[in-house]
Amino acid sequence: MKKDNYRWKVVGIFFAFMLLHQTDKLLIGPMKGPISDEFGLTNTQFGVIISSALIVSTLLYPIWGYLYDRFARAKLLALASFIWGSTTWLSAIVRSYIPFVVTRASTGIDDSSYPGLYSLIADYFTPKERSKVYGILQISQPIGYLIGMILALMLAPTIGWRRVFYITGSLGLVIAVVIYFNVKEMPRGKSEPEFEGMEEIGQFQFSWDAAKEVFKKKTMWFVLLQGFAGVFPWNVITYFFFDYLAKERGYDEMSVLLTMAPVILILAGGYFVGGLLGDWLFKRTLKGRIIVSAIGVLMGAVFLFFALNTPIESRTTFFIFMAIAALFMPFSSPNVISTVYDVTAPEVRSTAQAVEYFIENGGAAIAPIMAGVIADASSMHNAILYISIVAWSLCFLFYFGTIFFIDNDIASLRNQMAKRAADEKARQGA
């Protein structure tokens, strides 16, 4: 198989992994109703279930990042998929609240697996095309959420929510086998432009000194800050929005599906559009990806505000505002990943992104509990609105700060790669 065809085959396999994994991970949100009814849960207790998995994944991000930078990423991804399938089965077996919290917490183990996936993809594609590829991969997240919604609304009432978990867990075991036998490891740094045309580029090994250098770059400071704030809206919307539509806006199951399915499809397209725009503007200015990200969070906040403050009886207006918000909301996601890799050396990229996700998940772990407390004290409308608007406003300010440092940090990495390429050519010519 030709190199270009093979790398897109890898993208296809990873897309399937992310699609099914996100379906399994996000399925619990649309199934909040039947799960809460069976265990007799309050909003706060349900928030604890979500937060438990997020806390586990948060604690494990640095460990997964370190392992990915030291060992074969493809094999570790196969292991992560196996863990996903196994822990989902466990959560379907238990019959009471506390064991369910524990088993759902164990599903967070494999949720820390994405830094290895993204860093491996970075070694298949050049910097100028990465955001587009990440945008394609991240389409899987909202589509997975949509599939989860369909399973929760149409299949779970018929076969029960536990059997739905058995299905998604089994698919995780299948994907583990596919990744293990079909995805090859790629030398770290292979796609950097300075190594173009070189068959051998040497092996860049993880070192703590290189890892420490990552966090001396001011771009990373702002990336970490926006990461912490930026996940609050996503987690609140993911785990509370369907219940909000049903209980506070009076939508029945079919109305929820007909409203949210097209919104989620538009959101999926937003990942690709955001990545495409990020790559396009990055070729014209090194600030391009940050500019696109800032526009995304600003416009997402504005139109979510309009949507949530639309009168309940104005369903068409509500839908239009939600669709526009959904288009802009994911603009930053593929561009942030590319930005991390634009300023970090290949041998520490998994670690750098894992630390970013560690910080992000700190916010993600707090968000469901915070939303549950606000919802119990006030309303889900207020929980979603206040948390989202404040968080995205902070993200916009952090992106604005990044603009002042991104050029120098990217230039620093390019100089480092140029020196390595020159040293490798000298070694091969000796």
Image (spheres, helix red, strand yellow):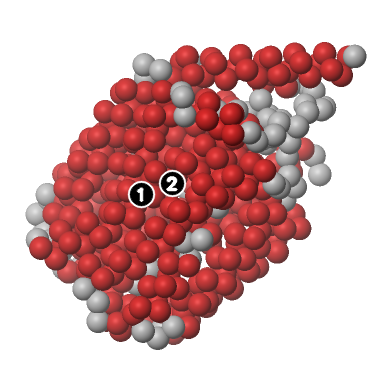
* Distance from the alpha carbon under mark 1 to that under mark 2: 6 Å
Residue 111 picture location, percent across and down: 49, 57
Which amino acid type is shown beneath numbered disc 2? Phe
Is residue 64 or residue 131 the one in the foreground? Answer: 64
Q: Residues within 10 Å of mark 2 (few under 14, many from 20)?
A: many
- Left or right, 410 with respect to 313, comes to right
Secondary-structure class at tag 2? helix
Which amino acid type is shown beneath numbered disc 1? Gly
Quadrant including the C terminus:
top right
Q: Is residue 422 above or below residue 374?
A: above
| Quarter of the view holding residue 295 | top left
Residue 302 picture location, percent across and down: 20, 38
Residue at left 9%, top 61%? Answer: 378
- Left or right, 215 with respect to 241, comes to right
Residue at left 29%, top 54%? Answer: 366
Is residue 277 something that shows in the picture? no
- Left or right, 177 with respect to 113, comes to right
Q: Is residue 27 above or below residue 354?
A: below
Quadrant including the N terminus:
top right
Q: Which residue position is annotated with label 1?
A: 362
Q: Residues within 10 Å of mark 1 (few under 14, many from 20)?
A: many
Q: Is residue 233 above or below residue 343?
A: below
Secondary-structure class at tag 1? helix
Residue at left 82%, top 27%? Answer: 199
Total numbered circles: 2
Residue at left 65%, top 68%? Answer: 174
Q: Is residue 6 above or below residue 426?
A: below
Is residue 419 something that shows in the picture? yes
Question: Extreme front residue here?
Answer: 209
Q: Which mark is residue 358?
A: 2
Residue 79 picture location, percent across and down: 64, 60
Contact? badges 1 and 2 (CB < 8 Å): yes
